[in-house]
Image (tube, helix red, strand yellow):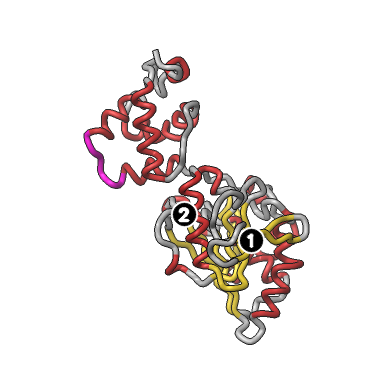
Amino acid sequence: MEANEGILKRGGTMDAEPLGANNYAFLAKYVQEATGIALGQDKLYLLESRLNPLLRDERLRSLGELCGRLRKGVPEAMRRRIAECMTTHETLFFRDPAVFEGFKTEILPRMARQQESTRTLRVWCAACSSGQEPYSLAMLLLEAGYGNWKIDILGTDLSSRILDRAKAGRFLQIEINRGLPAPLLVKYFERAGLDWQIKDEVRRLVRFAPLDLRQNLRAMGPFDIVFCRNVLIYFDLPTRQTILTGIRETLTAEGYLLLGASETTFNMEAGLSRVAIRNSIAYQKNPIGART
Protein backbone atom coordinates (compact mmCIF):
# COMPACT_ATOMS: atom_id res chain seq x y z
CA MET A 1 0.00 0.00 0.00
CA GLU A 2 1.27 3.46 -0.87
CA ALA A 3 2.08 5.80 2.01
CA ASN A 4 -0.92 8.01 1.35
CA GLU A 5 -3.37 5.20 0.57
CA GLY A 6 -4.64 5.09 4.14
CA ILE A 7 -5.47 8.80 4.08
CA LEU A 8 -7.45 8.41 0.89
CA LYS A 9 -9.44 5.43 2.21
CA ARG A 10 -11.09 7.24 5.08
CA GLY A 11 -14.39 7.32 3.19
CA GLY A 12 -16.00 8.23 -0.09
CA THR A 13 -17.79 11.44 -0.90
CA MET A 14 -21.36 10.21 -0.94
CA ASP A 15 -20.84 6.56 0.05
CA ALA A 16 -18.19 4.37 1.65
CA GLU A 17 -16.25 3.76 -1.58
CA PRO A 18 -12.60 4.82 -1.18
CA LEU A 19 -11.14 7.18 -3.72
CA GLY A 20 -7.74 5.46 -3.99
CA ALA A 21 -4.34 7.00 -4.58
CA ASN A 22 -4.48 6.76 -8.37
CA ASN A 23 -7.84 8.49 -8.61
CA TYR A 24 -6.74 11.13 -6.12
CA ALA A 25 -3.62 11.88 -8.18
CA PHE A 26 -5.73 12.02 -11.36
CA LEU A 27 -8.30 14.36 -9.81
CA ALA A 28 -5.66 16.61 -8.24
CA LYS A 29 -3.94 16.93 -11.62
CA TYR A 30 -7.27 17.63 -13.33
CA VAL A 31 -8.07 20.39 -10.82
CA GLN A 32 -4.61 21.94 -11.21
CA GLU A 33 -4.92 22.00 -15.00
CA ALA A 34 -8.41 23.53 -14.79
CA THR A 35 -7.72 26.10 -12.09
CA GLY A 36 -4.00 26.27 -11.29
CA ILE A 37 -4.76 25.25 -7.70
CA ALA A 38 -2.03 22.92 -6.41
CA LEU A 39 -3.38 20.22 -4.07
CA GLY A 40 -1.03 18.33 -1.79
CA GLN A 41 -1.34 14.70 -0.74
CA ASP A 42 -3.75 15.38 2.11
CA LYS A 43 -6.50 17.51 0.55
CA LEU A 44 -9.16 14.83 0.07
CA TYR A 45 -11.42 16.70 2.50
CA LEU A 46 -11.20 19.76 0.25
CA LEU A 47 -12.15 17.79 -2.86
CA GLU A 48 -15.06 16.21 -0.97
CA SER A 49 -16.44 19.45 0.44
CA ARG A 50 -16.07 21.46 -2.76
CA LEU A 51 -17.25 18.84 -5.27
CA ASN A 52 -20.18 17.38 -3.32
CA PRO A 53 -22.72 19.77 -4.89
CA LEU A 54 -21.54 18.78 -8.37
CA LEU A 55 -21.83 15.07 -7.49
CA ARG A 56 -25.39 15.57 -6.32
CA ASP A 57 -26.34 17.52 -9.45
CA GLU A 58 -24.77 14.93 -11.75
CA ARG A 59 -26.14 12.00 -9.70
CA LEU A 60 -22.70 10.56 -9.14
CA ARG A 61 -22.18 8.40 -6.05
CA SER A 62 -18.53 9.22 -5.34
CA LEU A 63 -15.41 11.06 -6.41
CA GLY A 64 -14.20 7.78 -7.88
CA GLU A 65 -17.23 7.71 -10.16
CA LEU A 66 -16.52 11.31 -11.12
CA CYS A 67 -12.97 10.32 -12.10
CA GLY A 68 -14.39 7.60 -14.34
CA ARG A 69 -16.60 10.18 -16.04
CA LEU A 70 -13.73 12.63 -16.48
CA ARG A 71 -11.47 9.99 -18.03
CA LYS A 72 -14.04 9.44 -20.77
CA GLY A 73 -14.12 13.15 -21.57
CA VAL A 74 -16.71 15.67 -20.45
CA PRO A 75 -18.27 18.83 -21.91
CA GLU A 76 -16.51 22.12 -21.29
CA ALA A 77 -19.44 23.14 -19.08
CA MET A 78 -18.57 20.42 -16.55
CA ARG A 79 -14.89 21.38 -16.60
CA ARG A 80 -15.94 24.96 -15.85
CA ARG A 81 -18.24 23.77 -13.05
CA ILE A 82 -15.39 21.83 -11.43
CA ALA A 83 -13.17 24.91 -11.64
CA GLU A 84 -15.88 27.06 -10.06
CA CYS A 85 -16.52 24.54 -7.29
CA MET A 86 -12.82 24.41 -6.40
CA THR A 87 -12.27 28.17 -6.42
CA THR A 88 -12.29 29.85 -3.01
CA HIS A 89 -14.84 32.66 -2.68
CA GLU A 90 -14.10 33.82 0.85
CA THR A 91 -14.35 37.60 1.00
CA LEU A 92 -15.80 40.47 3.02
CA PHE A 93 -16.09 44.24 2.92
CA PHE A 94 -12.88 46.12 3.81
CA ARG A 95 -11.01 42.88 4.45
CA ASP A 96 -7.73 43.59 6.30
CA PRO A 97 -8.42 47.20 7.36
CA ALA A 98 -4.70 48.09 7.48
CA VAL A 99 -4.50 47.60 3.71
CA PHE A 100 -7.41 49.96 3.07
CA GLU A 101 -6.00 52.48 5.55
CA GLY A 102 -2.64 52.42 3.77
CA PHE A 103 -4.38 52.78 0.42
CA LYS A 104 -6.40 55.76 1.66
CA THR A 105 -3.68 57.65 3.53
CA GLU A 106 -0.56 56.95 1.45
CA ILE A 107 -1.15 55.36 -1.95
CA LEU A 108 -4.19 57.41 -2.94
CA PRO A 109 -2.63 60.84 -2.18
CA ARG A 110 0.45 59.85 -4.21
CA MET A 111 -1.73 58.70 -7.09
CA ALA A 112 -3.77 61.92 -6.87
CA ARG A 113 -0.65 64.05 -7.30
CA GLN A 114 0.56 61.97 -10.24
CA GLN A 115 -2.83 61.88 -11.96
CA GLU A 116 -3.87 65.46 -11.22
CA SER A 117 -3.79 66.49 -14.89
CA THR A 118 -5.93 63.59 -16.15
CA ARG A 119 -7.99 62.95 -12.99
CA THR A 120 -8.19 59.26 -13.88
CA LEU A 121 -7.58 56.18 -11.75
CA ARG A 122 -7.61 52.55 -12.90
CA VAL A 123 -7.75 49.77 -10.31
CA TRP A 124 -7.82 45.99 -10.84
CA CYS A 125 -9.13 43.60 -8.19
CA ALA A 126 -8.01 40.10 -9.16
CA ALA A 127 -10.05 37.13 -7.85
CA CYS A 128 -12.72 39.53 -6.62
CA SER A 129 -15.30 36.83 -5.79
CA SER A 130 -18.76 38.34 -5.11
CA GLY A 131 -17.49 41.92 -5.35
CA GLN A 132 -16.97 43.14 -1.79
CA GLU A 133 -13.40 44.28 -2.42
CA PRO A 134 -14.01 46.42 -5.55
CA TYR A 135 -17.19 47.86 -4.02
CA SER A 136 -15.25 48.69 -0.84
CA LEU A 137 -12.70 50.57 -2.93
CA ALA A 138 -15.43 52.41 -4.81
CA MET A 139 -17.03 53.57 -1.53
CA LEU A 140 -13.63 54.58 -0.16
CA LEU A 141 -12.95 56.71 -3.26
CA LEU A 142 -16.35 58.37 -3.04
CA GLU A 143 -15.82 59.12 0.64
CA ALA A 144 -12.39 60.57 -0.13
CA GLY A 145 -13.85 63.02 -2.63
CA TYR A 146 -12.93 61.38 -5.94
CA GLY A 147 -16.48 61.09 -7.24
CA ASN A 148 -15.78 63.57 -10.04
CA TRP A 149 -12.71 61.66 -11.25
CA LYS A 150 -12.82 59.10 -14.04
CA ILE A 151 -12.65 55.96 -11.89
CA ASP A 152 -12.41 52.51 -13.47
CA ILE A 153 -12.38 49.57 -11.06
CA LEU A 154 -12.17 46.16 -12.72
CA GLY A 155 -13.06 43.04 -10.75
CA THR A 156 -12.12 39.67 -12.24
CA ASP A 157 -12.61 36.08 -11.18
CA LEU A 158 -12.37 32.61 -12.69
CA SER A 159 -15.99 31.85 -11.79
CA SER A 160 -18.68 33.33 -14.03
CA ARG A 161 -21.33 32.34 -11.47
CA ILE A 162 -19.79 34.35 -8.67
CA LEU A 163 -19.30 37.30 -11.03
CA ASP A 164 -23.02 37.30 -11.77
CA ARG A 165 -23.59 37.86 -8.05
CA ALA A 166 -20.97 40.61 -8.01
CA LYS A 167 -22.58 42.40 -10.95
CA ALA A 168 -25.98 42.28 -9.24
CA GLY A 169 -24.58 44.16 -6.24
CA ARG A 170 -27.06 42.50 -3.92
CA PHE A 171 -25.87 41.17 -0.57
CA LEU A 172 -27.28 39.08 2.26
CA GLN A 173 -27.52 40.56 5.74
CA ILE A 174 -24.75 38.22 6.93
CA GLU A 175 -22.48 39.59 4.18
CA ILE A 176 -23.31 43.16 5.15
CA ASN A 177 -22.45 42.35 8.77
CA ARG A 178 -18.95 41.27 7.76
CA GLY A 179 -16.84 44.40 7.65
CA LEU A 180 -19.19 47.08 6.32
CA PRO A 181 -19.34 50.17 8.59
CA ALA A 182 -22.88 51.22 9.49
CA PRO A 183 -22.54 54.77 8.05
CA LEU A 184 -21.58 53.34 4.65
CA LEU A 185 -24.50 50.93 4.75
CA VAL A 186 -26.90 53.82 5.34
CA LYS A 187 -25.30 55.99 2.65
CA TYR A 188 -24.63 53.53 -0.17
CA PHE A 189 -27.18 50.70 0.19
CA GLU A 190 -30.93 50.36 0.14
CA ARG A 191 -33.22 47.57 1.26
CA ALA A 192 -34.22 44.92 -1.28
CA GLY A 193 -36.52 42.57 0.59
CA LEU A 194 -34.38 40.77 3.14
CA ASP A 195 -31.19 41.74 1.27
CA TRP A 196 -29.28 44.95 0.61
CA GLN A 197 -28.77 46.50 -2.83
CA ILE A 198 -25.74 48.69 -3.46
CA LYS A 199 -26.63 52.02 -5.07
CA ASP A 200 -25.87 52.95 -8.66
CA GLU A 201 -23.42 55.68 -7.69
CA VAL A 202 -21.13 52.92 -6.40
CA ARG A 203 -21.90 50.34 -9.08
CA ARG A 204 -21.09 52.73 -11.92
CA LEU A 205 -17.44 52.82 -10.80
CA VAL A 206 -17.04 49.04 -10.99
CA ARG A 207 -17.13 46.55 -13.84
CA PHE A 208 -16.57 42.78 -13.81
CA ALA A 209 -15.12 40.25 -16.24
CA PRO A 210 -14.13 36.56 -16.11
CA LEU A 211 -10.38 35.92 -16.11
CA ASP A 212 -7.94 33.06 -15.55
CA LEU A 213 -4.84 34.63 -13.99
CA ARG A 214 -2.63 32.12 -15.80
CA GLN A 215 -3.43 33.64 -19.18
CA ASN A 216 -1.47 36.45 -20.83
CA LEU A 217 -2.27 39.57 -18.81
CA ARG A 218 -0.25 42.15 -20.72
CA ALA A 219 -3.15 43.52 -22.76
CA MET A 220 -5.22 44.26 -19.65
CA GLY A 221 -3.34 47.28 -18.39
CA PRO A 222 -2.25 49.78 -17.60
CA PHE A 223 -3.48 49.89 -14.00
CA ASP A 224 -2.45 52.35 -11.32
CA ILE A 225 -3.21 49.87 -8.54
CA VAL A 226 -3.69 46.09 -8.53
CA PHE A 227 -5.20 44.18 -5.62
CA CYS A 228 -4.34 40.48 -5.83
CA ARG A 229 -4.85 39.37 -2.25
CA ASN A 230 -5.09 35.88 -0.77
CA VAL A 231 -4.90 34.32 -4.23
CA LEU A 232 -1.30 33.28 -4.85
CA ILE A 233 -1.23 30.97 -1.85
CA TYR A 234 -3.33 28.44 -3.81
CA PHE A 235 -0.83 28.11 -6.67
CA ASP A 236 2.50 26.34 -6.98
CA LEU A 237 5.71 28.38 -7.20
CA PRO A 238 6.08 28.46 -11.03
CA THR A 239 2.45 29.56 -11.43
CA ARG A 240 2.84 32.26 -8.77
CA GLN A 241 5.89 33.62 -10.57
CA THR A 242 4.08 33.60 -13.93
CA ILE A 243 1.12 35.48 -12.44
CA LEU A 244 3.29 38.06 -10.70
CA THR A 245 5.31 38.67 -13.85
CA GLY A 246 2.06 39.11 -15.78
CA ILE A 247 0.67 41.54 -13.21
CA ARG A 248 3.89 43.57 -13.36
CA GLU A 249 3.28 44.08 -17.07
CA THR A 250 -0.13 45.61 -16.33
CA LEU A 251 1.17 48.21 -13.85
CA THR A 252 1.96 51.80 -14.73
CA ALA A 253 5.51 52.97 -14.04
CA GLU A 254 4.50 54.26 -10.59
CA GLY A 255 1.75 51.72 -9.97
CA TYR A 256 1.25 49.59 -6.86
CA LEU A 257 0.50 45.91 -6.28
CA LEU A 258 -1.08 44.82 -2.99
CA LEU A 259 -0.89 41.15 -1.96
CA GLY A 260 -2.38 39.28 0.99
CA ALA A 261 -0.71 39.45 4.39
CA SER A 262 0.75 35.94 4.01
CA GLU A 263 1.89 36.43 0.41
CA THR A 264 5.23 37.68 -0.86
CA THR A 265 7.41 37.92 -3.95
CA PHE A 266 10.35 36.44 -2.03
CA ASN A 267 12.45 34.03 -4.15
CA MET A 268 10.55 35.03 -7.29
CA GLU A 269 12.20 37.10 -10.01
CA ALA A 270 9.02 38.99 -10.82
CA GLY A 271 10.56 42.46 -11.21
CA LEU A 272 8.83 43.89 -8.13
CA SER A 273 10.19 45.69 -5.07
CA ARG A 274 8.69 45.95 -1.59
CA VAL A 275 7.41 49.31 -0.38
CA ALA A 276 6.28 49.98 3.19
CA ILE A 277 2.76 51.44 3.29
CA ARG A 278 1.71 52.28 6.84
CA ASN A 279 1.22 48.91 8.57
CA SER A 280 1.21 46.91 5.35
CA ILE A 281 3.40 46.16 2.34
CA ALA A 282 2.93 47.06 -1.32
CA TYR A 283 5.04 46.34 -4.39
CA GLN A 284 6.21 48.48 -7.28
CA LYS A 285 7.95 47.79 -10.57
CA ASN A 286 11.70 47.66 -10.80
CA PRO A 287 13.88 46.73 -13.79
CA ILE A 288 13.46 43.12 -14.84
CA GLY A 289 16.26 41.01 -13.40
CA ALA A 290 16.71 43.16 -10.28
CA ARG A 291 16.28 41.34 -6.98
CA THR A 292 12.94 41.65 -5.18
Say which element carries label 2: helix
Q: Where is mark 1, residue-wise?
A: 273
Q: State whether the magenta stretch is mostly helix, strand or loop.
A: loop
Q: Residue furthest top?
A: 1
Q: Is residue 159 left or right of residue 263?
A: left
The answer to whether residue 194 of the structure is visible from this angle is no
Which amino acid type is shown beneath numbered disc 2?
A: Thr
N-terminal of the pair, mark 2 or mark 1, is: 2
Instruction: Identify the residue at image location x=43%, y=20%.
Output: 8
125 shown above or below 45: below
Marking on residue 46: none
Say which element carries label 1: strand
Instruction: Identify the residue at image location x=45%, y=17%.
Output: 3
208 shown above or below 76: below
Instruction: Identify the residue at image location x=42%, y=31%.
Output: 52
Which amino acid type is shown beneath numbered disc 1?
A: Ser
In magenta segment, residue 76: yes
Which class describes the residues within 10 Å of circle 1: few (<14), some (14-19), or many (20+)? some
Kindly indicate the quadrant of the structure image that contains residue 140.
bottom right
Question: Which quadrant: the N terminus?
Answer: top left
Q: Which residues are magenta?
A: 72-77
Front residue of this view, candidates 87 and 113 = 113
Instruction: Identify the residue at image location x=54%, y=58%.
Output: 270
Rendered location of residue 171, percent (x, y): 58, 52
Front residue of this view, candidates 135 and 288 = 288
Label 2 – label 1 distance at C-alpha: 16 Å
Q: Where is mark 2, residue-wise?
A: 242
